[in-house]
């Protein structure tokens, strides 16, 4: 099984477990039974169950008046957001994206250069396209003064 799919399923299961524990703790609080400690609920949020913690807190209206608990939950969420951002930047494969971007740019430049037009040889030289061979983008017979198939070739004094 793909590692990303396995991690995703584990994350979903963790969030579902966290959500259900919020419901269990709310029920136990109303019946004065065995409770789940705040540190356990926050610990589950910290290891990846933050979505389940927020959903359980809102759905069951549990621990909404506990300011310290709410602040801790927000700190955990903020910490995870920052960690994901930096992790994404760190593990982002810049070489692969750069090579893909270079490939796209070269393809675009090839397509643009297919329609190149140089009014004279000075313009072709400024563009770095000279000398132009018959069949090259931008080649035109008026630029090929000696009709040898090479336009804008360097002048050689004879």
Image (cartoon, rainbow, N blue to C red):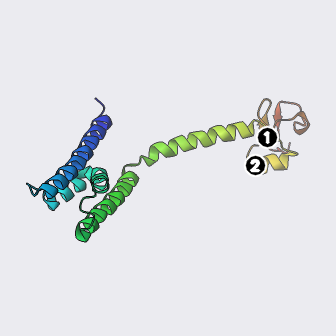
Q: Is residue 24 above or below residue 152?
A: below
* In the image, farthest residue toward the bottom: 67
Instruction: Name the residue that disc number 2 marks.
Output: 127
- Which of the image's four quarters has the C terminus? top right
- Which of the image's four quarters has the N terminus? top left
Q: Are marks 1 and 2 in contact (CB under 8 Å)?
A: yes
Using the numbered discs, state the Cα–Cα distance from disc 1 to disc 2 in whole angstroms. 10 Å
**Nearer-the-camera pick, 39 or 21:** 21
Q: Is residue 61 left or right of residue 147?
A: left
Residue 62: quadrant of the picture:
bottom left
- Other-residue count near label 2 (Cα within 10 Å), few / some / many at <14 / 14–19 / ≥20: few
Q: Is residue 109 left or right of residue 121?
A: left
Instruction: Name the residue that disc number 1 marks.
Output: 116
- Other-residue count near label 1 (Cα within 10 Å), few / some / many at <14 / 14–19 / ≥20: some
Of circles 1 and 2, which is in front?
1
Q: Residue at x 80, y 46 (%)?
A: 124
């Amino acid at each position: 099984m793909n590692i990303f799919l396995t991690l995703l399923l584990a994350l979903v299961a963790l969030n579902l477990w966290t959500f259900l524990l919020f419901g269990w703790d709310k029920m136990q609080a109303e019946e004065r039974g065995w409770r789940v400690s705040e540190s356990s609920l926050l610990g589950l949020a910290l290891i990846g169950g933050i979505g389940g913690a927020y959903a359980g807190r809102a759905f069951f209206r549990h621990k909404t008046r506990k300011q310290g608990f709410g602040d801790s939950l927000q700190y955990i969420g903020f910490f995870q957001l920052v960690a994901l951002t930096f992790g994404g930047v760190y593990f982002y494969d810049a070489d692969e994206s750069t090579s893909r971007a270079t490939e796209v740019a070269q393809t675009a430049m090839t397509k643009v250069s297919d329609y190149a037009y140089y009014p004279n040889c000075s313009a072709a030289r400024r563009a770095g396209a000279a000398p132009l061979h018959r069949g090259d983008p931008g080649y035109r017979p008026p630029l090929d003064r000696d009709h040898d198939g090479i336009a804008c070739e360097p002048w050689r004094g004879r």
